[in-house]
Amino acid sequence: MMVRRIALNGWRNYDWETVEFAPDINVVRGRNAQGKTNLLEAVYMLAMGRSFRSRYDRELVGFGFSSAEILADVEAAGREQTVRIVLTPGSRKQISVNSVKKSAAELAGTITVVLFCPEDLAIVREGAAVRRRLMDNAISQLRPGYAAALTEFNRIYDQKSAILRDWREKPSLLYALDDFSERLCRLSARLIRYRASFAARLDAAARPIHREFSGGADELGLAYRTVSTVGNPFASEREVYYAVCEHQESHRQAELDSGQCLTGAHKDDLEISINGMSARIYASQGQKRTAALSLKLAEREIHLQETGEYPILLLDDVLSELDAKRQEFVLNRIGGGQTLITCCEDDGITERTGGRVITVDGGKAVR
């Protein structure tokens, strides 16, 4: 699985540029603020249909351009395809694969990526939203149906939240509340079952990686948590739905009083433990970083198990945040697939990886 070449037009600080990648390691180097991360962001967009840095597509359009375009030749499962994405402020995003129109959800699976950036080192210490995002990004690529359900869930959640926020000023909104609650329970049941399954696979894959990483000193554990009435998240979707509905009924008045949505898959978390104790509370900074790295490398292994190919690995300036031991552990495990690593000009990554070097300067890339 790889991106062979990518052409950017009006994307961030790239006016017009074409970059060819090696099938294995590519080191994207250069000074700060030259466009290294922008290049990785474009590759991420090919897989996910969205940015990992900006919520709004209009922010991706370069200054002075009316639109931004990504055109790329990609390969997965021995099949070559051309992906084109056009972003025009005020218009719907245009996505096509081999000239066939696709939605962002339908784009999932064309290629898959695992991104590791400095913010991901906070997976352990930050709140549940960060860990839900880890699950959502991974599952969406492996299960297109999940991506569609998640999009619908977020839409219904926003609408229900608006009702709970505004019902005192507009009491008539309450007529629609129960309908939105029921739909949110139904979608939550679907997401919960997907997440529980993925969390179990991630736990199985991450444990041996973390054990090796820590030299056998620490044992990593993951536990999926959802609303309290769901005793078995692996039960049938119907059973999980009824359990979520039970939680909804008992929290209906609390939602009205607080103006917040208190029932649903948006309350989920992935609890991380080290040696049986909460990593978020008790682990050292070094242990938290080791755990975060192990989770990302485990995510890569799950993609391999699922597709028979390694996903494209995007390492965005993350090695500079790690000590020498952790750098070496990561670099020793990234073989077998295409990897894009961004780094500064003088941090020695180029010499240590032996990969193809792409130097980025002011939105221009040269080998």
Image: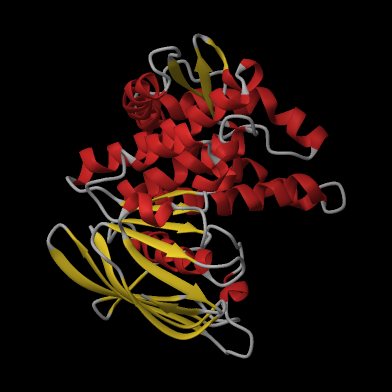
Q: Quadrant of the N terminus?
A: bottom left
Q: Does residue 159 appear left or right of residue 294 in this picture?
A: right
Residue at left offset 62%, top offset 21%: 284
Which quadrant of the view contains residue 177?
top right
Q: In which quarter of the image is the C terminus?
A: bottom left
**Image height check: is 25 above or below 277?**
below
Whole-percent x, y for residue 84 in the image: 35, 77
Whole-percent x, y for residue 154 in the image: 56, 50
Residue at left offset 45%, top offset 32%: 325
Q: Does residue 99 appear left or right of residue 88 in this picture?
A: left
Which quadrant of the view contains residue 221?
top left
**Image height check: is 110 above or below 257?**
below
Question: Is residue 143 at least partly visible in the picture?
Answer: no
What is the residue that sits farthest to the left in this orientation?
A: 78
Question: Is residue 150 at least partly visible in the picture?
Answer: yes
Whole-percent x, y for residue 182 in the image: 55, 39
Which quadrant of the view contains residue 26?
bottom left
What is the residue that sits farthest to the top in this orientation?
A: 276
Q: Does residue 106 appear left or right of residue 64 in this picture?
A: left
Residue 223 versus residue 40: which sits nearer the camera? 40
The colour scheme of the drawn protein is secondary structure
Q: Does residue 298 appear left or right of residue 137 in this picture?
A: left
Residue 138 versus residue 147: which sits nearer the camera? 138
